[in-house]
Amino acid sequence: MKILLMEDDPVLGEIVTDYLQAYYETDRAFDSEEAQEFIDEGRYDLFIFDINVPGKSGVELLEELRSFNDTTPAIIITAYDDTKHLKESFDAGAHDYIKKPFELEELKLRIEKARILFHIEQDAPVIISEELTYYPRKHIVSDGAKEISLRPKEAEILDYFIAHSHRLISQDELVQNIWGFEELPSDATLRSYIRKLRESIGSEKIITQRGLGYRYE
């Protein structure tokens, strides 16, 4: 996964870049002009743009890129704490927004959410068990003889579990990373998706820790 970070703050930029480079291929631009040069030279899977940088703001640069049909997923980071800048960011074509100060782990979670939502680097099949293989792009689980098609939300939940294997995932975390604010599911709906997913991949793969959440093994 290749990320372009645009952040002019020397301290924050270095901290975030060092952190991201431990997990992803990451380039860092100090301003919009340098960011455009990086974009002209190669393809990126994700943009992370700060709003307040020299030259064009992160929102202005993203809006311009969208006008040229660049559909690269984008996260806007900013110190602003108002809905005006939030709306401007989404109107410009951002898919996510994170406010300063933020934890590095939170940023990574948002990146992983983008990886799942936009199927970045998900061409390769995933081994679920000795018998089952999962094909992320097709949303199919296969045992070699038959195929099971997962509903879109089931596939998104499985993608999230796979990206965070062996870690306790609370119900709130799962909901916030799979559903939008306008479509939050009921507890019963979430349990229904989990039940159907267990029927497809094996009940032993998703462990319920009562009152805490789920763990994918």
Image: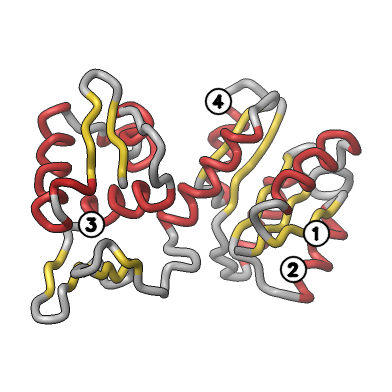
Mark 2 is surrounded, within 10 Å at the Cα level, by few (under 14), some (14 to 19) or many (20 or more) other residues, namely some
In three-dimensional space, the C-alpha distance between marks 4 and 2, rounded to whole angstroms, equals 29 Å
**Alpha-carbon distance for marks 3 and 4?**
30 Å
Q: Earlier in the sequence, mark 4 or mark 2?
A: 2
**Front one among 199 and 115:** 199
Q: What residue is pinned by disc 4? A: 83
**Contact (Cβ within 8 Å) of mark 4 with mark 2:** no
Disc assigned to residue 35: 1
| Residue 172 occupies quadrant | top left
Task: Label 1: state its secondary structure.
Answer: helix
Q: Do the residues labelled 1 and 2 touch (CB within 8 Å)?
A: yes
Label 3 SS: helix
Q: Which residue is drawn at 70% across and 49% down?
A: 20
Among all residues in the image, which is located at the extreme front? 130
Question: Quick one: label 3 or label 4, which is nearer the N terminus?
Answer: 4
* Upstream in sequence: badge 2 or badge 3: 2
Q: Which of marks 4 and 1 is in front?
A: 1
Q: Which of marks 4 and 1 is nearer the N terminus?
A: 1
Residue that appears at 78% across and 47% down: 17
Q: State the CA–CA distance, disc 1 to disc 3.
A: 34 Å
| Residue that label 3 marks | 152
Nearer to the camera, 81 or 215? 215
Q: What residue type is labelled 3?
A: Pro
Q: Give me the residue at 50% from left, 49% from top.
A: 112
| Rendering quarter of residue 64 | bottom right
